[in-house]
Each structure stands twice: as C-alpha cells, then as structure tokens.
Image (cartoon, rainbow, N blue to C red):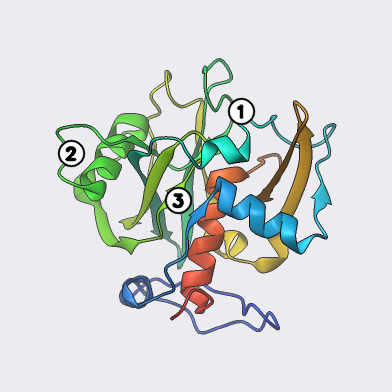
Amino acid sequence: MEQRALLSDRTDNRRRPTLSRDEFRARLAAPRRAIEHGDVATAMRLMARGTLTRYDTDKLGPLPSSGIPYDRAVKMKRTPAAVLVPLIEAQGSFSVLLTMRPADMKKHAGQIAFPGGRMEQGDADAVACALREAEEEVGLDPAQVEILGRLDPYLTITGYEVTPVVGAIRGPVTPVPDPIEVADAFEVPLDFLLDPENHQRVEREFNGLRRAYYAVPYHERYIWGATAGMILNFYDILTGAAGP
C-alpha cells in the first residue's frame, strides 16, 4: 500500500484525502497558471496585500543575505539551477529533507535550503542537476529517488532561476552532509509544511531596503525566503490553488 500525506484545505482547513505517490505525480503534472515565482514577485504581491508580520530580530533567523534592490534584481542575468525536494516515506507518512548552510559561507550563510545548486555543463537537465547536488551535499543515492514532477521555476534575488524537482525516497534516510556546504540536514513533517496556519507573510528593513517574503518557522529552524516560497508553491499545486 502507498504511504500517504495529509493536506489541509486552503479555505476551511478541513483535512483532504491522503495522497499517494501516483496522486502527487498527477497533481504535479496537471496544467496550472503560468505566473512568475521568485523573491521579487513574492515581495511585490505581499507588499500589495499588506497585513504583513514584522520580523522579530531577537527571536527569528538570519538577516537577508543580499542588499540587492528589487528593481535591480529583475534585470540580472538568470543562472539556471535546480534543487531536490526530497519526500521521505516512513512509518505511514512523508517528511521533507532540508539542509542548513554553514555560518561561514559567503552567500546564504546559516540559511535553510533544499539540496541543490547551479547547473553544470555535464547536467543533462534540471533533474540530473538536482540529483547530483543532493548526492554531493547529503550523500543521497540518485537510485533511491523516484522523480514525481517539478514545481514552478523560482527566480532568486541573486539571479538564480531554480527548478524544484520533487522526488520520493523510501525511508529511513541517513544523510551524510558535506561539511563545506551543509552544516546540518534534518527532516520536517510534510503535513507541517503544507498547513496554511504555518505559512507566515513577513516584512523587515535591511540596509534601508524593505523586504517582504514567506516564512515557515519550525521549532528553532527559520525556513524563509526562496525555500519557503517553493514550499508555498508546492502547497498551491497540491491543493489546486495553482490550477488553470
């Protein structure tokens, strides 16, 4: 029998039927609206809506890693990249494997991310890139991963056009982090990430620039920015909010 994950309804939070791998695959393959996703697009939509939560400097995670203004970011050259969204099946439910970047990295220090990185010349496509990066960063064997589909491309403020590739892995999984790129690897229940009550809309000032972004805090982990944006895109796709 397929392992299954529980989803919450966007409007009234009623629990939906559980999803199997085949159902994940079908929803990821279904037609959906072609809108741009990314740091700038997210910020513009959030600032237009208002009612944002102020960032709590004393309690929450790292500062934004870039002082690039939004109007300059949209003109940057786009660099293809990919991440793996690893869904781990174990004990009747799904969890998601995430990584935390080392505090001494020049870019994105201390941030939480899916395994991934820029595409290299030897990568046949985004799937090959995501699998290679996951193997390099956390020791995940590509043969363990069943590809279920892709989320929408996400453009970061630093110019990376990221393709999130969703893959299912039979658990348990024991990550082997590369200490140069990964300070820690951990799992978060998929139910938690897909619960709209955990989706925050945040704003803060950084170097005189107003920032607006999504966040999905999990215990002491502050999941925000591009990673949180991809999680919300996954939620929209699975619940039909990103439909045609």
Residue 158 x %, y % = 49, 33
Q: Amino acid at mark 3?
A: Tyr
- Number of other residues with Cα within 10 Å of mark 3, as a class: few under 14, some 14 to 19, many 20 or more: many
Instruction: Kindly report the distance in space between the C-alpha atoms of the residues bearing marks 1 and 3.
Output: 17 Å
Q: Amino acid at mark 2?
A: Asp
Quarter of the rendering occupied by the N terminus: bottom left
Residue 175 x %, y % = 39, 36
- Number of other residues with Cα within 10 Å of mark 1, as a class: few under 14, some 14 to 19, many 20 or more: some
The mark that comes first in sequence, 1 or 2, is 1
Corner quadrant of residue 123: top left
Report which residue position mark 3 lands on.
Answer: 154
Total numbered circles: 3
Report which residue position mark 2 lands on.
Answer: 123
Report which residue position mark 1 lands on.
Answer: 65
Q: Residue at x 51, y 25 (%)?
A: 183
* Between 182 and 31, the one nearer to me in the picture: 31
Residue 73 x %, y % = 53, 37
Quarter of the rendering occupied by the C terminus: bottom left
- Establish if 201 lies above or below 63: below
Circle 2 — which element?
loop
